Amino acid sequence: MRDVAISGGVLFVCDEPSNLIRLYSLADGSYLGSGPTLPKSPTHLSAQPSGLYVSADDQIFWSALPSSPTPSGLCFTSVLSATSINSNYKVGGITFNGSTAYVAFQDGTGTRGTGAIYSYSVQVAPPSAPAFGTGTPFASGFPDTPEFVLFVNL
């Protein structure tokens, strides 16, 4: 397990080795099943009213959230590629402040490498996949690779 998110009484869990998002009931902990297999290993999640965002390797995937707590409603599509910023980048975490997404990009792993955080304006038009605008550097020059990001309004 790499990351978790909660929405609509469901715990979403990244199963990195199996390339799956697994779902569990918050009410009783029962296993509800898994979404469709992703083409790459999922590492980070962000549940938003606009849907479930999943980072996996050099991509961010999106699915509308199921209307009921079952995995059959998940259908992932790629909405952002890290290679549009740098061909070596992998996607770390993703967080939101309203319609602005902050995405961590990694060039390396752990303390071996660098990375950056970019901000994106995100246009949402349910039930269609969101559209990410052009990324703008938000922070860079890290001494290691940024991974988890969380927007906190102080």
Image: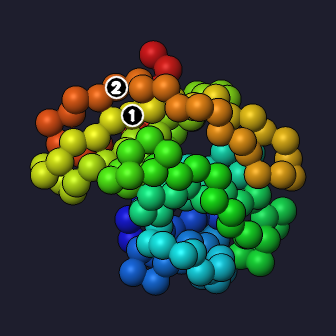
User: Which kind of residue does numbered mark 2 sit on?
Assistant: Ala
Closest to the observer, 99 or 142: 142
Based on the displayed image, in which of its 4 quarters is residue 39 positioned?
Answer: bottom right
Q: Residue furthest top?
A: 154
Residue at x-position 58% and y-position 64%:
11
Query: Residue 88, labelled with which disc?
Result: none
Q: Work out which quarter of the rendered image holds the C terminus and state it.
A: top left
Instruction: Please give left or right for residue 116 compared with residue 47 in the image.
Output: left
Estimate the x, y position of residue 66 in percent, counting from the top left: 78, 64
Mark 1, residue position: 117
Query: Residue 139, labelled with which disc?
Result: 2
Q: Are marks 2 and 1 in contact (CB under 8 Å)?
A: yes
Estimate the x, y position of residue 132 in percent, counting from the top left: 65, 39
Residue at x-position 77% and y-position 78%:
72
Residue 78, compared with residue 1, is above or below; it is above
Closest to the observer, 84 or 75: 84
Q: Secondary structure at mark 2?
A: strand
